[in-house]
Image: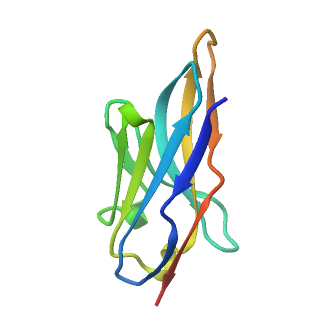
């Protein structure tokens, strides 16, 4: 089973920047889509950004132009570079991967444990 370990969260002032990283480990799998979601306090989880195997990216409208998602396939790692952060970006950020296990026809979604990002005004 794939394990995801996130890092890079923390406290930052409005206008600042942070980089989140997520490493997938395990064996006998191929990663398809990678992405990030977030859950602000008292709100539902929402997709922030995703990146496909070919590099195609999608972003939540509220973060477009401020956040950049990228991936390093050799390291099974996905990054989220966040700049011009706003207090409304405060949330727990979760890494997400969709994987195919060798010998299995279906694909599976896995989520990280979450990392807190707090933006002070």
- Could you say where residue 19 lies in the image, as x and y percent from the top left? 40, 62
User: Residue at point 39% right, 65% down?
Assistant: 63
Q: Residue furthest left?
A: 65
Quadrant including the N terminus: top right
86 sits left or right of 114 in the view: left
Q: Residue 38 at what x, y percent from top left? A: 57, 61
Find residue 28 and report its horizontal and vertical position in percent: 57, 18
Q: Residue at x 48, y 63 (%)?
A: 8
| Relative to 32, 45 lies left or right | right
Which of 86 and 62 lies nearest the eye of the viewer? 86
Q: On the image, which quarter does residue 78 sit in? A: top left
Q: How is the image coloured?
A: rainbow
In the rendered view, would you say 80 is above or below 17?
above
The correct choice, above or below, for 25 with respect to 13 in the image is above
Residue 66 location (% of width, % of height):
32, 66
> Residue sitting at 61 percent across and 9 percent down?
103
List the single residue furthest toward the bottom: 121
């Amino acid at each position: 089973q794939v394990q995801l370990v996130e890092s890079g969260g923390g406290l930052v002032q409005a206008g600042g920047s942070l980089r989140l990283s997520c490493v997938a480990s395990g064996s006998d799998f191929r990663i398809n889509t990678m992405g990030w979601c977030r859950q602000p306090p008292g709100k539902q989880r929402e997709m922030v950004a995703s990146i496909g195997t070919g590099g195609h990216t999608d972003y939540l409208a509220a973060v477009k132009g401020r956040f950049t998602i990228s991936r390093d396939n050799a390291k099974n790692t996905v990054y989220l570079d966040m700049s011009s952060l706003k207090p409304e970006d405060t949330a727990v950020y979760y890494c997400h991967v969709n994987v195919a296990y060798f010998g299995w026809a279906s694909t599976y979604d896995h989520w990280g444990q979450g990392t807190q990002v707090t933006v002070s005004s």
